[in-house]
Amino acid sequence: MAVLNKLSPILAATVLLALAPTALAQSTTKKLYCWNENGRKVCGDALPSSAVNHARTEFSVKSGRATAHVGRALQGEELQAAQRAAHAERLAAMAAESAKRRDHAMAESYDSETALRRAYQHRITLLEETVKASELGVTGLRQSLLSLLRRASDEELAGKPVPRPLAESILGQHQLLQHQQGVLAQQRMDRSAIDDEFNSALERYRAMKTPSRSDG
């Protein structure tokens, strides 16, 4: 500015006008930051490294208006929880997209409700046969376990200790029976759920096959 004082008024004005766009651009891009630090509100034209993780508001120097609100950086368990939530959202979005693709494939694969019903009936028949087989298996395991328990009871009534191999067989048979009962319970749930699944699929199928009013 000392140099400008040595110039003629006209030349000085010309130089200022030439420099004005550069100065204006700098002022419009410059920001002010305000954040809380130890219970106090602190503002400045630069953000120190100690405040990078703080919640802050950014202001335009030119207009004085807030241009952005930046939340504080998450740490520790909060960050892990946010990551888990984001992961769950991504999985939900992927599942929704996968379901949409399956519905389109369903609409293209079956040319009528009868064909769709026939496909589900096939699955229902397989599930029912699987349940019956598991029920027979559970019945057989239960009878086998009862036979082993009777043998152990006879040994005890005769005043003899239960042989180790017999005791181990009883334990193994009991564990196998519990496992098979759990499998059977899940199969029965699957059989019960498939009816609701079919009704839902049929509803979606009808919605996709029915022309919308805009198509007419």
Image (cartoon, grey):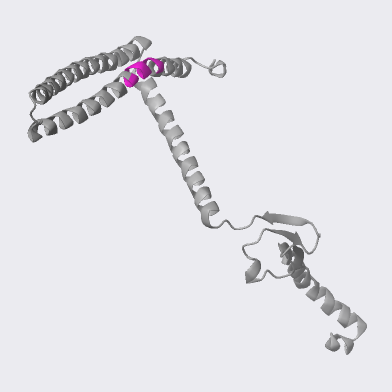
Q: Quadrant of residue 32?
A: bottom right
Q: Residue 195 magenta-drawn?
A: yes
- In x, y percent, where is residue 89? 49, 41
- In x, y percent, where is residue 132? 22, 14
Residue placed most toward the observer, 65 or 23: 65
- Magenta segment, prevailing SS (helix, strand or loop): helix
From the viewer's perspective, is 127 left or right of 8?
A: left
Residue placed most toward the observer, 212 or 205: 205
Instruction: Name the quarter where the N terminus is drawn.
Output: bottom right
Q: Which range is magenta?
A: 189-196
Q: How many marks?
A: 0
Q: Quadrant of residue 16?
A: bottom right
Q: Residue at x 24, y 28 (%)?
A: 179
- In x, y percent, where is residue 181? 25, 23
Q: Is residue 23 above or below residue 130?
A: below
Q: Is residue 4 above or below residue 31?
A: below
- In x, y percent, where is residue 114? 34, 9
Q: Residue 53 magenta-drawn?
A: no
Residue placed most toward the observer, 148 or 34: 148
Q: Residue at x 76, y 64 (%)?
A: 40
From the viewer's perspective, is 168 left or right of 33?
A: left
Q: Is residue 31 above or below residue 129?
A: below
From the viewer's perspective, is 165 left or right of 26?
A: left
Q: Residue at x 75, y 60 (%)?
A: 59
Instruction: Name the quarter where the C terminus is drawn.
Output: top right
